[in-house]
Image (spheres, grey):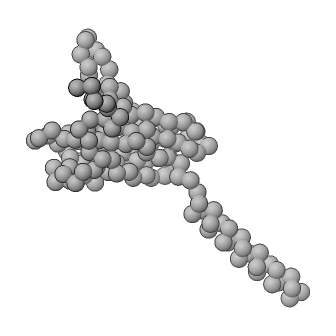
Amino acid sequence: MQAVSRWVRHCGAALCLALVAAAHGQVQALSVEQGWVRALPPGKTVTAGFAEIVNRSTQACSIEALASPQAERVELHSTAMEGGVMRMRPAPLPTLAANSALSLAPGGLHWMFIGVDRHAAHAGALTVTITSSCGELSAALPLLRMAPDSDHSHH
C-alpha cells in the first residue's frame, strides 16, 4: 500500500510539473512580424504603423482593441482610391482565421497612432498592444523614415 501511495504522489508531482512546463511552453497565438512605424514629421503627432500579424493557433482570434502607451489611441485604417484621391478611413477590427496572417502595409490596412507623445517618439520605437480573444500581445515597432525593405540605391 505504501508503494502505491508513493507512486501516486510521484505521478501527481510529475503531472503538475508537466502541466507547468506545458503552460510555459505554449506558443502565443498572435505575433507581430516585420513591424515598423513611419517616423513622425516635425510638429506632427499622428503616424502610421505596419506589420504582419500572424495567428499560429488552431482557432480564430478576434482583435478586440489596440493601444499604445505612447499614443492617445491606436486605430486600424484602410486606404482606398476614391474619385482619383487616396482616402483613409477607420476600419473594423478583424478576426484572423486559424493559421493565417493579416498584412498591414502602406497603401492598404495600417495602424494609425494618434496623439503620439513627442518625447516617446524620439526614443526610436513605439509600442502597440493588441488585445484579442486569444490573449494580449505587445510589440515594440522601430520608427523608420521609409519601409525597411525599400531599395533606393538607384538614386
**Residue farthest top in this picture:** 83
Choose top left, top right, bottom left or bottom right for residue 38.
top left
Residue 41 spot, x, y in % from top left: 15, 38
Judge whether residue 37 can be spotted in this image. yes
State the residue in front, 97 or 22. 22
Q: Residue 61 vs residue 129: left or right? A: right
Quarter holding the C terminus is top left
Question: Looking at the picture, how far across and down is residue 93, in whole percent?
Answer: 41, 36
- Give x and y (percent) for residue 88: 27, 26
Q: Quadrant of residue 154?
A: top left
Residue plotted at (68% across, 68% down)? 18
In the picture as drawn, the residue positioned furthest to the left comes out as: 43
- Vertical order, 110 against 27 (above or below): above
Left or right: 53 with respect to 56? left
Farthest right residue? 1
Placement of 91 over or under 40, stated as above or below = above
Locate the N terminus and report the quarter of the image it occupies.
Answer: bottom right
Q: Nearer the viewer, residue 54 or 154?
A: 154
Considering depth in this image, is 146 or 108 the residue closer to the camera? 146
- At horizontal 56% and vertical 53% (from top left) the residue drawn is 27
Is residue 1 left or right of 109 when viewed as pictured? right
Looking at the picture, how far across and down is residue 83, in whole percent?
Answer: 26, 11
x 44%, y 52%: residue: 136
Q: Residue at x 43, y 33 (%)?
A: 103
Question: Does the image show residue 64?
Answer: no
